[in-house]
Image (cartoon, helix red, strand yellow):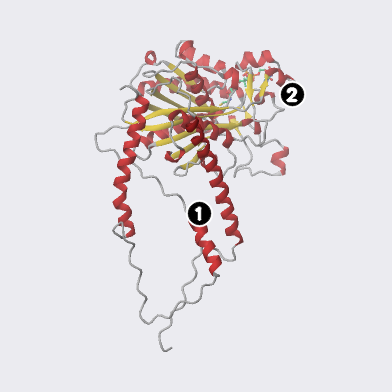
Amino acid sequence: MDNPQLHVMQQADASRTDGSRAEAPRADAHSGGNGHNPPPAPSPTPGALPSAPPSVSAAVERARNFGNSLLRPPQPMPRLPLAAAGERRYAQIVGWGMQVPDKVITNQDLEQIVDTTDDWIRDRTGIEERHVAADPRETSATLGAAAARKALEVADVHPSRVNVIMCATSSPEHTFPSTGSIIQDLIGADNAGAFDLSAACSGFVYALSLARGMILAGDAEYILVVGTETLSRIVDWTDRGTCVLFGDGAGAVLVAASDVPGGVLAVELGSDGSGGNTLILPAGGSAMPASLETVSGGNHYIKMDGKAVFRFATKVMAEATQKVVARAGLTLDDVDLVVPHQANRRIIENSVLRQLKIPAEKCFINVQKYGNTSTASIPIALCEAIEEGKVKPGDKLVFVGFGAGLTWAACALEWSVPVGKRPEDNWWQQTRRQATYQAAAYRSMWKKAVRRVYDMLPTDPEASPAPPPSREPGK
Ligand SMILES: CC(C)(COP(=O)(O)OP(=O)(O)OC[C@H]1O[C@@H](n2cnc3c(N)ncnc32)[C@H](O)[C@@H]1OP(=O)(O)O)[C@@H](O)C(=O)NCCC(=O)NCCS
């Protein structure tokens, strides 16, 4: 195969074209027509009285129809039918992107805030600096959307072709709506379903395993898996035990259906809820709703038993890696690169390097630059590993993470797409891309405006008017 990435795209395109053809007759069947002529209007019931005058004026009626047409959900893209028996599909990562806030906080900066030292933080964690979303307009969704756009650009896939957005996050914008839905709106992925996945720092690998499942089942062609965090907003900046560890950022991958063998080969997921209290954000959920007391007690901040998490992490990172490698039919010697969750250099060294005896050059570490960015840490590390030329087609990779829950997750992959620099977009491609995002922003504003107009209408446009009481003739 000359260009597997191209082939992956072409295969997905071909599938979509086939899907469109397959879907057409079904649309006719639903409408009851022949596909060209509208179904005949129902004939009036003999003897029925003319219907009562409309309860809303003609102008309001027109506004209602206009509004309905704007608020109607976009037609879903035709989906590929389930792969025929014996036909294999593979879930390949074809795009990747990351975004971190500009503001950097060094260990020296932290020395001014809490009782800590640069030496202690470097020695105990390996962290030197982290990025923090200082601008309040920078949120988990905006960072995630920026990373998602970059992943789409690498793959040269239009947002409208994404079927699902899975957003793994430990610092969602809200309990609901999901940060995934906000990202969907921001990037204009009008044909995508979207949701958040909560498995703390293991969330990205959990989402990737779900994306693989949907693609192998034939339910999706393109899935955006996003890990995004603004942990600085839920960290207690007076608690030296936690504030030195975390950072903000986002990473995303675009997973595509392909007939090129490889991609995500195997997954290993785990949970031990008995350890939930060792790493927890106590307040704000249904068990401890936000109140003056929870805020004054600082229960809306991350609480952690560092030692317990450390013990758990070193154990499960090694075990999960071993299991997923075996499940993929590989040995540890076959692995070209481990991309572990970047929580603490010592955890990675104790588990991946010492317990599994994987050489340091086969384990990617960038915790020194970003701290622990939870769900974003693995996709950010992947982007940097690619940038540094540490990933090439044919390589066997392992992503392995752990986090609150307690949870852990690993997946083994065979990398299949070229990672060289894409040629710079020409002015037309750049303009078209900008126009796409601008159009998404205007579309979103327009839909919000239409909803406001709806609110001002004297009647609920969605409520169908009650049918007039039928009277028998002569009564
Ligand atoms: C948090 C962590 C770095 C602490 O390292 P540690 O070696 O276990 O440190 P300890 O908790 O034993 O503390 C050792 C001493 O350093 C002190 N200390 C803790 N944080 C400090 C800081 N930021 N600066 C200076 N001293 C600090 C402690 O108070 C303690 O002092 P004491 O001996 O006088 O009581 C480590 O336990 C860890 O990384 N755990 C995993 C956390 C994690 O990954 N969480 C996210 C999971 S996704």
Position of residue 441 measured from the top left corner of the image (x, y, whole percent)? 56, 43
Label 2: few (<14), some (14–19) or many (≥20) C-alpha neighbours in 10 Å: some
| Number of the label disc, if any, that sits on residue 113 | 2
Q: Which numbered dot is residue 70?
A: 1
Say whether residue 121 is left or right of residue 16: right
Kindly identify the amino acid type of the residue bearing the numbered disc 1.
Leu
SS of the residue under disc 2 = loop
Which amino acid type is marked by label 2? Ile
Q: Is residue 89 visible?
A: yes
Residue 83, image x, y percentages: 29, 38
- Quarter for ligand 1? top right
- Residue 31: image x %, image y %? 34, 59
| Of the pair 220 and 397, the residue shown nearer to us | 220
Q: Residue placed farthest to the bottom in the image?
A: 474
User: How many labels, in total?
Assistant: 2
> Where is residue 57 shown, x and y percent of the image?
55, 70
The extreme right residue here reads: 112
107 or 432: which is nearer to us?
432
Q: Quadrant of the C terminus?
A: bottom left
- Residue 18 lies, with reference to residue 338, above or below; the image says below
Mark 2–mark 1 distance (CA, rounded to whole Å)? 51 Å
Query: Most extreme residue toward the left, as rendered?
Result: 86
Left or right: 29 in relation to 447: left
In the displayed structure, 417 sits above or below 75; it is above
Q: Which image quarter: residue 329?
A: top left
| Element type where label 1 sits in the image | helix
Q: Quadrant of the N terminus?
A: top left
Q: Are marks 2 and 1 in contact (CB under 8 Å)?
A: no
Q: For this rendering, which residue is in front, 27 or 292?
A: 27
Q: Earlier in the sequence, mark 2 or mark 1?
A: 1
| Residue at the outermost front position | 427
> Residue, x 38% and y 19% (percent of image)?
393
